[in-house]
Image (tube, rainbow, N blue to C red):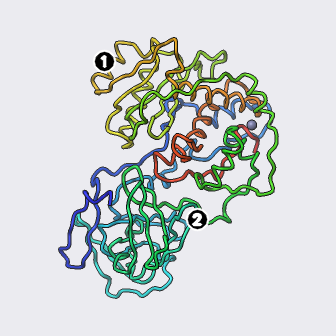
Amino acid sequence: MGSANAVVADDSNGDGFWMVTEEVGQAQLRSAEPDPLLDEPEHWEETVCAQIEGAEMDLQWCGPADWLHNDWEDLLFEEEKACAVITPVEQDGAPRVELYDSGATRHISPYKPDFTSYTPLSPPVFLNTANQQRFPAIGSGTLTIRVPNKGTESELALRGTLHAPSVAYTLVSLGALDQEGFHAHIGAGHLDIVSPKGERVGRIARTLRRLYKVVHTSEPVDAAELVSVMELHRRMGHIAVASARKLVESGAVTGVELDPNSQERDCGACIFTRATRLPVPKVRISPPAQHFGDEIHTDVWGPASIATRQGRRYFVTFTDEATRFTVTYLMHTKDEALAAYKSFEAWALAQGNCTAVKVLRSDRGGEYLSDALNAHLAAAGTARKLTRHDTPQLNGVAERLNRTLLERIRAFAHESGLPKSLWGEALRHAAWLKNRTATRALDGKTPFEALLGRPSDLSGLRVWGCHV
Ligand SMILES: [Zn+2]
C-alpha cells in the first residue's frame, strides 16, 4: 500500500490489531482555497447589502456556503491523516469515509446504521493503535459499504467487522479481504478489488497522499438537485455545454443531476463574450509537473478601468501545474504581488499541499523582477522561470487562465446586471468554479479533486448574482 512505509506494528495486547499512523502530530485542516479578501473588513454579504440599500431588492449571497465561510465540519475530512482515532462521528448524517489499509488486520467501522447483521460485544474488546491510544469495539457483524467501480458503485459486505464508535472512519482490512478469497491489485494509481469469482467489485483511486481512501460526500442520487444542461452551463460560469454535461456524467462533481429532457440552447452571455475573444496559442514547454508546488504559474492582470469597491484594480493568479488548482488575490497596485505570493506560499505550506515551491514561472513584468521578490525566492530555495515579456503566450497556463477568468467575469456582469465594481467578487467566483471544472490536463478530473482527493459537491450552487 502507499502507506506501508508508515505502518507500525503494535500488537502488545495480542488482539491482532495494528494500524497506520502516518504523520502523527501533523493533523491539519486543509482549506480548499485561501480567501483572497481575508484582510477585508467587508465581506460579500455586506458589500451587496450596502449596494442594494434603497434599491429594495432582496439579494443575498447565493453561491455555495463555503465560498464565504470555511466549512470546518467538512474540512475535517480533508485530513489525509490515516490514524483513525479518536473522533466520534454523527451516525446518520455524516459523510461515509473508508480507508483501504494493508496495515489493519480487522475491518473496523464507526457507522452502526451500515451494519446488516450485528451482535453486541459484552464485555467490549479493547483495541490499540500504534501510538498507544486505546478504544473499545462494542459490537461485530457484517458491514455493507459502497465501493466506487468505474463510474458506478458496488456493494461490498465486510464480514467480521468490529463496531468501534470512536474511530473516525471505516478501516477496510486488505488482509481480511484476502482471507475471504478477494484479490487486491495495485497499479497505475488505483487499487482494484476482485471478488473470489474473478469480478472486479471496486476500483479506488490513489489520493495525492498515496492513500486508497473513499469519501462519500453526497447523499444517494435522489438527494441531488435536477438541473437542465443550460442551467448548469450558467452556474458553472459558462463552460462549454458538452463539458458541463460530462462533468456530471463522469462523476467529477456530485450534488447535481442533469435533467435528461433538457435541451441545448444558445446562451446570450456567451454570444456577448465570444465577440471579444482573442485566441491564446497552447504551448507546452516542459513535461507536466507531478506534484503540487513543482511549478507554480503566476500572472498579474490590470489595471481594471473600474476599481472594486475596496479600490482594487489588479489581480494576480497562482496556478499549480500538477493539480491546476488556482488561487487569486486582488491588489491595489502591482507591487502587492510579492505580498500575494507570500500569502499563497504560506497557504500552500500550511495546508500541507507541498513543503516548498520549487519553481515560480512568470513573465518579466517589473513586479516579478524586484530585489525583494528575488531575495524571498532565494531564501525559500525557489527557482524561477521567466518567459520573454514580448511573448506572453509562452507563459501559457497563466495567460490562458486570465483570459478565461476575464471572460467569465464579463459573462457574469452581462447576465446579472450587477455593478461592474463587483468584478472582484465575480473573479473570486470564477476561480472557485474553475477549480471545480474538469480539465483535459487532468484526464477529466477537476483541480479540486486533484488537490483534495475527492469530487467537489455542487449542491447549493446558483447562478452568480441571482436574486433569491
Ligand atoms: Zn453561456
Badge 1 is on which residue? 375
Find residue 23 and report its horizontal and vertical position in percent: 28, 53
Badge 2 is on which residue? 152
Q: For residue 393, what is the image quadrant?
A: top right
Q: Earlier in the sequence, mark 1 or mark 2?
A: 2
Q: Give the amino acid type for the residue marked by disc 2 in the picture.
A: Thr
- View quadrant of ligand 1: top right
Judged from the image, the secondary structure of the residue bearing numbered disc 2 is strand
> CA gap, disc 1 to disc 2?
51 Å
Locate the C terminus and report the quarter of the image it occupies. top right
Check the image and report above or below for 23 versus 178. Answer: above
Q: Give the amino acid type for the residue marked by disc 1 in the picture.
A: Ala
Locate the N terminus and report the quarter of the image it occupies. bottom left
Find residue 100 and report its horizontal and vertical position in percent: 39, 65
Judged from the image, the secondary structure of the residue bearing numbered disc 1 is helix
Check the image and report above or below for 375 versus 65. Answer: above
Check the image and report above or below for 366 versus 257. Answer: above
Q: Residue, x 32% and y 83% (percent of image)?
A: 124
Residue neighbourhood size for the residue with mark 2, other residues' Cα within 10 Å, grouped as few (<14), some (14–19), many (≥20):
few
Q: Residue, x 31% and y 67% (percent of image)?
A: 102
Find residue 268 and report its horizontal and vertical position in percent: 81, 34
Residue found farthest to the left: 12
Q: For residue 370, what is the image quadrant?
A: top left
Find residue 90 and report its horizontal and vertical position in percent: 49, 67
Q: Are marks 1 and 2 in contact (CB under 8 Å)?
A: no
Ligand 1 under 8 Å from disc 1 Cβ: no
Decide if residue 14 is on the left or right side of residue 100.
Answer: left
